[in-house]
């Protein structure tokens, strides 16, 4: 069984993958994933809980320590809980909140206001549910330590009482982690794609109103030569207050150079790179480059804005910076799609399986083994578990798991990296199974909106030329 790496950079590289699943209808994605549903659990977006400057417990995304001895007055939260909130929630819910998080969680009052998802309950009541929710846990990205969870649970169960601790808590600084951004790349940036005004290099003005859950697409004619390979890339996060996540696609369908507008994703859009809060710089494995297309392609940068605080002064130039190989890398990686589009989830169904099989007769045409270096499983909100298995030689008697997600979480979609790579041999079959619960009184089928469903595993593998030009396998097979 391959070793699963720390999924951090991979997880968030493709987190919220294929935003084409949601942009056209402005779906519920922005309300159900990432920082927008961090420690407070889908709470109010009116900014009423941003509190006073009295919090030193929720650090900003840069990991700076607000717990200095000369800091502000006590926040009303016990020092132990302040430290937990700083460690586990502070990246998004600091003061001010960033990445589209609806509020700060840095003082007592923040936990006492009505929850945006249920105004009959307080934030602390909803947060109590979320810390133990198997499908939608808080925080949404990194697992909270057991002792942190136990302590936070006890405080919330007591009604999140105000602390009588006087003065300012002496908090441990939050580890900022490895540096992120183009300046931290060990290579020369050759290409950038950033948000812009229409037909301009100026930053995009994020609307003050109507951008609580806004998908905006920025288009570019390809600047890369045929055969260009990416070796590393870094996110460029400009106005972190409003950026929820971004994804870069390439397409053979022509797009206007310098265009900006609502997202209308072409059917041939191919995932290139992506970022969500917590994402880091990304480096391809040694000797492997990611295909970037050629001069006849167009690029589409899709950014999900979450301007819940209605900032009027948000001018954003978020995007991505690439390093490309000076010389061709020995191996070229690309993205392959497994799964099925033939979904029919009955009303009221529980533990309902849908599967797609990439058959052995197709892989038998591969001239050499395919090396899978990472995989991203993708379903929507009804997804409960996800499995991709390799049937060696096409046999049910020789099944090896490739991707195993026993408790799928739409809000925390991870990209799993494999070291060493998993080899798919010529003649192997690959079966992807998605399991759903459908609480509705109507069937749910395949579709791009989050009210619909999907069953895909996007895998990064090399040598991609062994697959040929068709990168879907089994997804269109209805049995």
Image: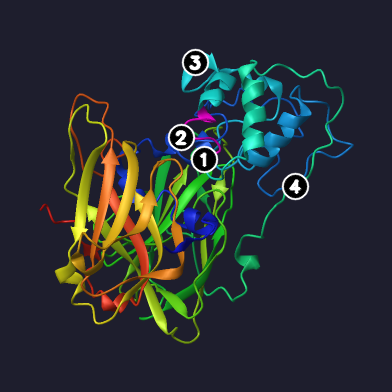
Q: Which mark is residue 140?
A: 1
Q: Position of residue 106 (x, y in %)?
A: 69, 30
- Give the farthest residue toward the bottom: 327
Element at badge 4?
A: loop
Residue contact between numbered discs 3 and 4, judged by CB atoms under 8 Å: no
- In the image, residue 51 above or below residue 312: above
Real-space Cα distance between discs 2 and 1? 7 Å
Q: Position of residue 360 (x, y in %)?
A: 18, 68
Query: Which residue carries the number 4 mark?
Result: 64
Q: Quadrant of residue 424?
A: bottom left
Instruction: Work out whether mark 1 precedes mark 4 in sequence or the reverse, and give the earlier one.
Output: 4
Real-space Cα distance between discs 2 and 3? 19 Å
Instruction: Work out whether mark 2 precedes mark 4 in sequence or the reverse, and give the earlier one.
Output: 4
Image quadrant where one finds the N terminus? bottom left
Query: Which residue carries the number 3 mark?
Result: 119
Q: Which residues are magenta?
A: 130-140
Instruction: Work out whether mark 3 precedes mark 4 in sequence or the reverse, and give the earlier one.
Output: 4
Closest to the observer, 326 or 468? 468
Please identify, in this view, whether the residue under mark 3 or under mark 1 is nearer the observer: 1
- Badge 2: how crowded within 10 Å, few (<14), some, or many (20+)? many
Query: Which residue carries the number 2 mark?
Result: 136
Instruction: Work out whether mark 3 precedes mark 1 in sequence or the reverse, and give the earlier one.
Output: 3
For the point 20% across and 24% down, the residue is 441
Residue contact between numbered discs 2 and 1, judged by CB atoms under 8 Å: yes
Q: Quadrant of residue 89?
A: top right
For the point 59% across and 21% down, the residue is 124
Left or right of 211, for residue 470 = left
Residue contact between numbered discs 2 and 3, judged by CB atoms under 8 Å: no
């Amino acid at each position: 069984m391959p070793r699963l790496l720390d999924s951090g950079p991979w997880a968030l590289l493709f987190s919220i993958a294929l935003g084409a699943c949601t942009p056209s209808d402005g779906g519920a994605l922005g309300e159900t994933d990432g920082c927008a549903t961090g420690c407070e659990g889908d709470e109010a977006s009116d900014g009423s809980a941003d509190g006073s400057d009295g919090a030193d417990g929720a650090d900003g995304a840069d990991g700076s320590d607000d717990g200095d001895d000369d800091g502000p007055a006590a926040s009303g939260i016990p020092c132990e809980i302040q430290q937990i909130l700083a460690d586990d929630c502070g990246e998004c819910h600091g003061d001010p909140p960033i990445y589209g998080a609806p509020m700060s969680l840095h003082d007592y009052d923040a936990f006492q206001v009505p929850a945006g998802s249920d105004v009959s309950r307080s934030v602390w009541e909803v947060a109590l549910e979320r810390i133990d929710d198997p499908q939608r846990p808080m925080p949404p990205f990194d697992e909270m330590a057991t002792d942190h969870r136990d302590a936070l649970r006890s405080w919330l169960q007591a009604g999140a009482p105000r602390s009588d601790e006087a003065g300012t808590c002496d908090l441990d600084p939050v580890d900022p982690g490895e540096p992120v951004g183009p300046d931290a790349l060990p290579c020369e940036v050759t290409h950038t794609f950033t948000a812009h005004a229409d037909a301009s290099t100026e930053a995009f003005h994020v609307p003050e109103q109507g951008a609580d859950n806004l998908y905006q697409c920025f288009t570019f004619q390809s600047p890369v030569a045929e055969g260009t390979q990416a070796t590393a890339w870094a996110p460029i996060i400009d106005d972190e207050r409003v950026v929820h996540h971004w994804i870069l696609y390439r397409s053979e369908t022509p797009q206007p150079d310098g265009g900006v507008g609502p997202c209308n994703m072409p059917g041939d859009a191919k995932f290139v790179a992506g970022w969500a809060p917590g994402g880091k710089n990304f480096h391809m494995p040694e000797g492997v480059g990611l295909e970037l297309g050629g001069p006849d392609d167009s690029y589409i940068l899709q950014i999900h804005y979450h301007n819940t605080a209605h900032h009027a002064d948000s001018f954003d130039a978020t995007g991505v910076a690439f390093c490309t190989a000076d010389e061709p890398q020995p191996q070229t990686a690309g993205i392959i799609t497994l799964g099925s589009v033939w979904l029919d989830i009955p009303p009221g169904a529980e533990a309902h399986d849908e599967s797609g099989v990439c058959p052995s007769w197709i892989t038998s045409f591969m001239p050499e083994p395919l090396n899978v270096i990472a995989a991203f499983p993708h379903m929507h909100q009804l997804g409960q578990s996800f499995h991709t298995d390799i049937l060696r030689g096409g046999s049910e008697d020789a099944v090896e798991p490739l991707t195993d997600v026993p408790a799928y979480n739409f809000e925390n979609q991870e990209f799993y990296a494999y070291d060493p790579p998993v080899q798919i041999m010529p003649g192997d079959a690959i079966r992807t199974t998605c399991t759903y619960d459908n609480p509705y009184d109507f069937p749910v089928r395949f579709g791009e909106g989050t009210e619909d469903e999907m069953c895909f595993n996007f895998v990064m593998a090399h040598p991609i030329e062994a697959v040929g030009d068709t990168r879907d396998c089994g997804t269109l097979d209805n049995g």
